Amino acid sequence: MSDVPAPAAPLKLFNSLTRQLEEFQPVHTGEARVYSCGPTVYNYPHIGNMRAYVFADILGRTLSFKGYKLTHVINITDVGHLTDDADAGEDKMEKMARTEAKSIWDIAQHYTQAYWEDIKALNIRQPARWTIATEYVPQMIQFAERIADKHCYELDSGLYFDVSTVENYGRLGGIKSELAIEMRQLVRRLGDISHDGTDAFSIKMRIYEEVENFVELLVRLKNESAAKDKYQDFIDLWKSTPSPDNNEFNDKFSETLAEVKKFLESAKAEARIEEVKGKRNEEDFAIWRKTPPGEKRQMEWDSPWGKGAPGWHLECSVMSGEVLGFPFDIHTGGIDHREIHHPSEIAQNQAFCCAGGLDLPANSGARVWMHNNFLVERSGKMSKSSGEFLRLQLLIDKGYHPLAYRMMCLQAHYRSELEFSWDGLGAALTRLKRMLMAIEQLKARIPPPTGEGDHPQGGGGAPSVTHDGAPPPSAMFPLPVPGRKFTPFLERFESAVSDDLNTPVALTVFEEVLALKKVDPAEKLAALAAMDAVLGLGFLTLERAELRLRPKGVETETAEIEATLAARKAARADKDFARSDALRDELSAKGVEVMDGDPLGWEWKL
Ligand SMILES: [Zn+2]
């Protein structure tokens, strides 16, 4: 007997464009069209990059869970992404091809494959479409032609977009743009003040106030936006500076001022946009990069502006608009795209939509822009000099199942910074093990099916989640509909994910259901299955033994370990403790830790 469905919680998502939570209103009734900026396939993805796709996956699964027909597109950038997002440097793909002495096409194929393997390992659903940038070049040229007259100008190096031709460029960038402007002004003002000399107390006071305001902005930037550790040192230094009401202020301030100047110089150097001669505005960007005369690029196409390649921003505008149609519902990406890549996409979309007579709501291309925060690694142990590159394979080599990383992502809200540590990853793995043990015990209590269609089937036979456009998960499992007892939990779960994808809360609701006693086991498994369709931890099909990964370099076979452990068990049963200890030592010498009485029933680990 099925319960009356509870009124669904409205789906609220944080829109970076308006900086507020908004109720999701699909452009097309019952549908959700989502575009996610994909990887530039010149190297293996860092696990921090993979956080963006776990986030997009949770968004997609939530939309499916809420009954929307999802069309998700992720692109693969195989041309046009420069080493500097702001139009400077060289093509990342060309550079890597040279380093590895391979063709760009080989580089693209190799790293796309590596990325897809990570997608699979993290149980991220396949999008409806992967769009490959080099397959859309004719459309990119058409798009550029349509906006060129009104919005672009040609230089020797390419066709440039004039950001002053669209309204409100960079509104997405928000505080970071504010900081850049403030930094330029502060440098100028400090210069002016310095002309007055810097010794008098009143001048120091003026400088102090200027820098104090600037540091406030830095703190806000750290909290709200692309938080950068390098700002923290400066913020700390400033906080430890004696304030003007402190006796030491006058004596110590010159020292601090030197540090302030140093910081501003380095920040300015870093923010430097390589000068392109003839650019009308600092933020203008190339939508088509011409191949320099006398050169031949591995990847180049004919265009009305000469041989060349499309700009990175143009690619995403074209692929999203082409496949999903403007306006579509949601555009996602990492927070690092919020200052340059996405504002540039929006500017092009505005230009394109206006040219096509589409009115204001369509102008940004997507109605909702969502950004996940960074993964940060503060211990410093993963610095480049240690030679360890934090990619999924490294986690696997160290014996951590990829889904432990997915769990780690889910434990934090996507808009919060996620701090990476091996301990944190270990804790996420333990949580996963604990949940799986409870699910295995639950499955064991469900009677096997006795005939066709007459009895609920255990989770072991449940199909894994299907792809886009799937019916609500409860309809897919040959499990009973969870009864009234589960309703409040499922409602709370739905509220949590509907509240801007609050996965940390959703996980705790999942665990509460897991801990419920005196309920029908098959119904309980059905409730868990419905929730896992959103969490995507693969609980119904994942076996606990699969979580046990062999760290790289460990030779001992699992069967051998199990055999030795069985012999040790027998020895203990015979009270032959000398032999039992000897067998334990033997395992220990092979790097196997025996865990007697482990509450998770794990018994041994490598
Ligand atoms: Zn993009």
Image: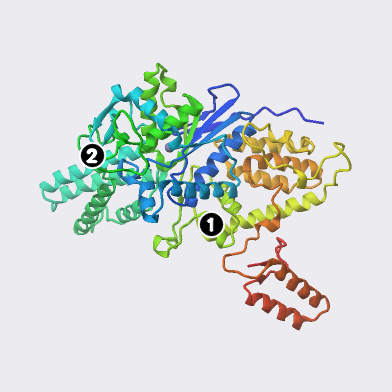
Residue projecting furthest to the left: 196
Please report the residue visible at 53 percent of the width from the left and 54 percent of the height from the top: 392
Residue to which mark 2 is pinned: 276
Residue 113, image x, y percentages: 52, 48
| Amino acid at circle 1 | Gln
Quadrant that contains the C terminus: bottom right
Q: x, y (%) of residue 381?
A: 44, 63
Given residues 199 and 102, the one toward you in this image is 102
Image mark for residue 393? 1
Measured Cα–Cα span from mark 2 to mark 1 = 39 Å
> Left or right: where does residue 281 sit relative to residue 171?
left
Q: Amino acid at mark 2?
A: Val
Q: Nearer the viewer, residue 212 or 427?
A: 427
Q: Whereabouts is ligand 1, in terms of quadrant?
A: top left
Q: Residue at x 36, y 52 (%)?
A: 98
First in residue order: circle 2 vs circle 1: 2
Q: Nearer the viewer, residue 528 or 145?
A: 145
Q: Residues within 10 Å of mark 2 (few under 14, many from 20)?
A: some
**Quadrant housing residue 252:** bottom left
Give the quarter of the image for residue 350.
top left
Disc 1 on helix, strand or loop? helix
State the quadrant of the N terminus: top right
Q: Is residue 179 visible?
A: yes
